[in-house]
C-alpha cells in the first residue's frame, strides 16, 4: 500500500543520506554516477526483497525501494 511505500522510502532515504550512498540499494553498490544518487519517491518502485512468487510476504520488512531501472531488470529474483 502507499503508506508502506512512503515509510520504506523515507527510512531507506534517510539511511542512504547518512551513509552517502544512493537510496536504491543496487545503485549504491555500483561504481557509476548513480552510486550516490538520491532518487525521488516517484522515480522508484516498491520491490519484494524475497520475491512474492517464491513465498515472500507483502510486508514492510520484505519491502525495499529500487530505482525503476533496477526493479525492472531484477525480474523474479
Image: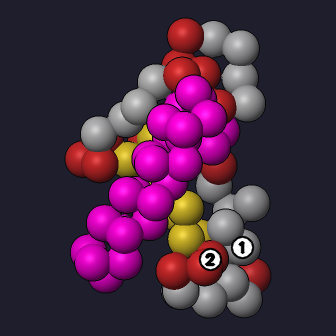
Q: Position of residue 30 (x, y in %)?
A: 71, 23
Asked whether disc 1 touches disc 2, contact meaning CB atoms under 8 Å apart, the reply is: yes
Q: Earlier along the polypeptide chain: callout 1 or callout 2?
A: 1
Work out whether residue 52 can be spotted. no
Nearer to me, 25 or 77: 25
Task: Residue 37: say if magenta.
Answer: no
Q: Give the residue pinned by disc 2.
A: 62
Q: Quadrant of residue 49?
A: bottom right
Q: Give the residue displayed 44% in from the left and 66% down from the top.
A: 8
Cα separation, mark 1 vs mark 2, equals 7 Å
Q: Is residue 43 left or right of residue 67?
A: left
Q: Position of residue 66 (x, y in %)?
A: 51, 48
Nearer to me, 45 or 5: 5
In this picture, is 41 found above or below 62? above
Q: Give the residue displayed 73% in from the left and 30% down from the top.
A: 29
Q: Residues within 10 Å of mark 2 (few under 14, many from 20)?
A: some
Q: Give the residue pinned by disc 1.
A: 50
Disc number lying in front (1 or 2): 2
Q: Give the residue displayed 53% in from the left and 32% down from the top.
A: 22
Residues drawn in magenta? 1-26
Q: Secondary structure at mark 1?
A: loop
Q: Give the residue displayed 37% in from the left and 35% down from the top.
A: 39
Q: Is residue 53 left or right of residue 46?
A: right
Nearer to me, 16 or 27: 16
Q: Is residue 31 left or right of residue 32?
A: right
Q: Position of residue 18 (x, y in %)?
A: 54, 38
Task: Residue 22: say if magenta.
Answer: yes
Amino acid at each position: 500500500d502507499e503508506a508502506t511505500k512512503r515509510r520504506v522510502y523515507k527510512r531507506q532515504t534517510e539511511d542512504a543520506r547518512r551513509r552517502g550512498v544512493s537510496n536504491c540499494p543496487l545503485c549504491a553498490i555500483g561504481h557509476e554516477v548513480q552510486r550516490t544518487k538520491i532518487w525521488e519517491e516517484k522515480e522508484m518502485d516498491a520491490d519484494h526483497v524475497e520475491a512474492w512468487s517464491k513465498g515472500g510476504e507483502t510486508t514492510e520488512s520484505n519491502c525495499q525501494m529500487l530505482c525503476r531501472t533496477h526493479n525492472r531488470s531484477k525480474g523474479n529474483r
